[in-house]
Image (spheres, helix red, strand yellow):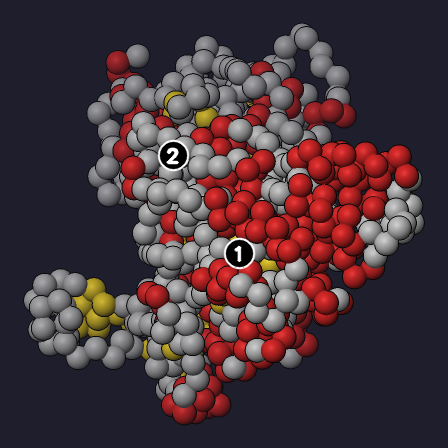
Amino acid sequence: MDQHKPNMRMAGDGASMKEKMKATKISVRKQTVGYLRDPFGNVHFGKYPGMTRKPGKRQREDSSSSSQQARCSYTHTGNVPEDLHPESEAPSVEKSSLRGKDLYVQLLIQHKGYTLADVIGSSTIMQEFNSHNNSLEENSFHCVYRRPVRAIDYMWAYTCSCQTTDHEEVSNLEPVLEEAGLPSRSEWCIHIQAGKDILEQLDAEKGMNAETVFIQLENEGLQDHIYHCALNIECSIFRLSGGHDTTLIGVVLPSEQFRAQQYGVLMMKNNKMSCLACKKPCQHVKLISDLKENRHDVSHEIQQVLDSFFEVSDFTCSTGNALYQCLSWEKIPFFRNEAFTRKMRTGFCGLVTVDHGSEFYSLFPNLSTCPGCGAVLDTVVVSKKVPVFLCHSIEYSTVSKQVCSNCGAVHAYDGQEELVLNMRSYLMGHDVLRSYLHNFCRGKRPLYTFFKVWKDDLDDRGVPSDELTYHKFIHAWYAFVELLDIDINREFSCSECEATLGGQPTTVVCDGTSLSFRRDLLIDEAPPTHADCVLPRLSTHRDRVYVTHKEVRVLVQNFCSPAKKLGDSDFFLLKDLTKKHYPALNTFLIEIQDGSTVCPAPYRKFLIDAVSNYPVCAILLPIPEVEQLLDDMFSGINLRKYPSKWSSLHQHIPILFELFCSDHSLLPLNEKLTALVMDMWKIASQTFEATGLQHKCSEILSESSRAFFPMLEKLHCRGKFAADATNTRPVRCQKRFPGHPSLLPGIFTIFCEHGVCYGFQVMETCESPNVPFTIFSTRFKKAPSVVVYDFACSLQAYCLNRDPVFFRETRFVVDRFHWRNHNACPSAYNLAKYPSLSSLNSQMNEQANSGLKRIKDQLSYMSEKHFMDHCKLFLFKKNIDAKKSC
């Protein structure tokens, strides 16, 4: 054995085989073997037909299962890393002049329909050949395996995934054989024949053969080497290159552990992973899914493969690890100007000089000095020709870079002057990106639909668009969004509200919408650190309502309902209960009774609101204006004689205003109504007779990446409240919607009364009053004067249970559209009752949410970062439009 182990190294850059294998993420342990029986019955290995042996006595029957083909529904044009492809292209031969294997080889090379798993080609995944129409199958792959073995001489042993039985036998052979051949059931398939021709051509270019590889592997102890990942599954993972709409990766599992399908071709479509080789849930999908969660436990090389595979979700152009790295750095203007319009009208072709000799354009960086050291930049390096994707054409250009001879810094071409985005391997025109920008902000067209329409338009113009892929477009779009020059802070604030305390809005319109992203794409955040103190409950719901007995409440409601016609016995019961528990109410009921058991029409609405199971402070808000009005009425002043007071009553206590309009005799306030109103005012005032709570005692202040309020910085912590530990629901109105199984509930937006959005918060749980409560209590120096919310009744109860002092002067109202659903709520929650709010567009939030729902299809399966960036961009444009309309 020793005489066969000379100390040899592979031809090339001098690196060891172990280093080359590690750099390309290969797996060489017990690779598969292929063999060929000639017409005379002799068996041949690899390209050494001189080694023969007579077939064994054991006869084998042909099996149809040995030629199974993996079918799938994905179009794979394939490509291979540049260093593994022949430098020269395949000769130009008419397809009709070639047949069978020769045509298959040419198609694989021309369309880059094969990918090597490693530098020695131990596994080569290639597209299937369709012999009927002489083309590559768009939805089928096979894998050709080879390994170096030694018998009489060194040779390559081949097998193919379409011959499962042969592959299982040969993959478990020892690397050193005692005989030259093995019995075979069939000749080499067309995949092995084509793969062998391609691999031999690559071997010749690299100065590599079976002997050198065998000896090198044996010297370095790598004949049984395979990678071990974090899950103890031995495998080889590599990226399939080529012009695809999404990244494909190849996975080769050890045959001794997985006897089903050893190789797999994985793709991501609609954010769902599938295997094109197995076409069913398999070990390949499970492995990559597990590695996605444990990416930090694998080698850096495999991490790069996984990053490129999941980069539609995880891509950021600033990381530098992405397949398509954005080299442009200058900010891209969002707003049009004269120079920009002139460039757009001229177009790309009018901005650069064409090299007529080579029929493509030449683009150079326009830097004169190095930004780093200030030295003159005089060295220009010309790169290869790249495509330039424009709205109505695809051009080609060389893109140069400048190298500083002083500090060695490399400065890439930016493309701002020519209105193109430099994505390293291609350029994307601003005309395309801005076209989709307008579609995104105005329409309902998803990114993929825009891309397909764009490609169809190019096809109509006769422009070949094979090089243009969705993968390239989406990465250029993400980079474009990051480079847009927009002042987020300025546009997410209202000039009309800047005069108020800290620039915060005093009237707030808020609501949630179902726009969200996948829960499993949430970025982990450290939970807030809580202190030991729990802020106590200052009052209970029972303390804040006037009538606490349900029986009395039902009897009064029936008394005010002509359809129910309260009986005499029930009316006597009502008088007895109110006399015992609510004397002022009893006196008023006796006063207004006209001999029947039905309440007179003018007093019905007032009584129903007064005895409702909602806080009295919703009717009599304890603010100075209300207190002054009550003092005037208790003093015997007839408010109808004072227009300003009468108007103030309409604005602040609309329920009494409507009562006095129905019965003028009630003003000046009579003694019986005075007692009832005084009891209600006493309860409303006691709700807020407490010391303000200290927010900062409960937790450390921290910002969340899922909250965006640039002009409402976090001032306080939410705190821990005793009411958080309870689950009481004293009010009837609830907001419960079925959630999506994999998406988050949505986002919660805050608008000022002028239609400007101040920001949004991603909701990790179902929409509840906790979301607006947390925003108001942590980001507002003073609670808003008016909060418009479709479930304002529940929100007020939630706030009063936790921090009533902070919300003492806040009026909670329900917007006009949703008020019709609040049958049991007092009319004090009806926004339409307040004259000062008559001009308020209470539907501004719903209208904005309807716009957000238009982009739901394309945002729902983005990563958290891209989701937040696109929401900011969309609302940024909405704010610009809102300010223009004011």
Q: Residue visible at 56% across and 42% down?
A: 544
Quadrant in the rendering for residue 695: top left
Q: Position of residue 812 (x, y in %)?
A: 56, 56
Q: Which residue is mark 2?
A: 535
In front here: 218 or 274? 274
Q: Position of residue 768 (x, y in %)?
A: 57, 43
Q: Position of residue 684 (x, y in %)?
A: 53, 48
Q: Which residue is mark 1?
A: 621
Q: Which comes sooner in the sequence, label 1 or label 2?
A: 2
Residue 622, image x and y in percent?
49, 55
Q: CA distance from mark 1 to mark 2?
A: 24 Å
Residue 826 vertical placement versus 849 (above, below): above
Q: Nearer the viewer, residue 710 or 447?
A: 710
Q: Residue at x 75, y 22 (%)?
A: 63
Q: Residues within 10 Å of mark 1 (few under 14, many from 20)?
A: many
What's the residue type where badge 1 is placed? Leu
Q: Amino acid at mark 2?
A: Leu
